[in-house]
Image (tube, grey):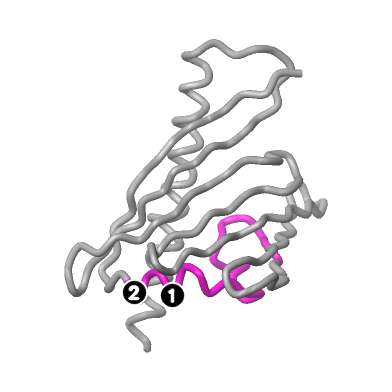
Amino acid sequence: MALVSLRYQFRQPFHVPASAAFAWCTDFGPADGPLFSARTVRSIRRLGEDALVMTDTTYPEGRPRKIRRLVRINPSEMAWTNTHLDGPFRHSQYWYRIVSDGPRSSHLEFRGLRLVSTDRRLSASETARRAKEQKVHDAGEWRRRLAPALERDLRKS
């Protein structure tokens, strides 16, 4: 079994102030499930002010799959990390940072390092293709689901 690192990054603009975007993005809770394209049930266990374990249960092919993630929040940099503790992408890490673009706009800077087990070594081009597919998927979740929900929720408040 080979372990392959898929590295990718993207930016997602928001039409809201950076501080509001950061607060929304790091307000993890059980109500987050409907934000995702796959059916998700979420629970949170707070470890301290800046750390929590997030357990997501998804239902691929109708069967439950639990994934625990360690989330560390760094308010001074408007950033957080998400490290998979188990599941199919164990030890994968994701870095998020909100950057101000002015008084009413901001953007997310995302970097992913997904570790994938494969039955064979992958060529550089196959690794790059898989990383691009993952980037397209993750950026799409932010563009189509998370960013619109963030902006909708913040317009209400």
Q: Secondary structure at mark 2?
A: helix
The spot of residue 14 in percent (x, y) is 29, 64
The spot of residue 35 in percent (x, y) is 54, 66
Find residue 19 and name its label: 2
Hey, what amino acid is under mark 1?
A: Ala
**Left or right, residue 126 beside residue 67:** left
* Crowd band around label 1 with a 10 angstrom C-alpha radius: few (<14), some (14–19), many (20+): few
Identify whether 14 is placed above or below 138.
below
Q: Secondary structure at mark 1?
A: helix
Q: Residue furthest right?
A: 63
Residue identified by numbered label 1:
23
Is residue 28 found inside the magenta-colored segment of the image?
A: yes
Q: Residue furthest left?
A: 102
Determine the CA span between mark 1 and mark 2.
6 Å
Region rendered in magenta: 19-41
Find residue 143 and name its label: none
The spot of residue 155 in percent (x, y) is 32, 82
Q: Which one is nearer the viewer's eye here, 124 or 77?
A: 77
**Residue occupying the point 53% across, 54% down:** 81
**Residue occupying the point 68% across, 39% down:** 89
**Residue occupying the point 44% across, 43% down:** 111
**Residue occupying the point 72% across, 49% down:** 85
The answer to whether mark 1 and mark 2 are in CB contact below 8 A is yes
**Left or right, residue 86 beside residue 110:** right
Is residue 68 found inside the magenta-colored segment of the image?
A: no
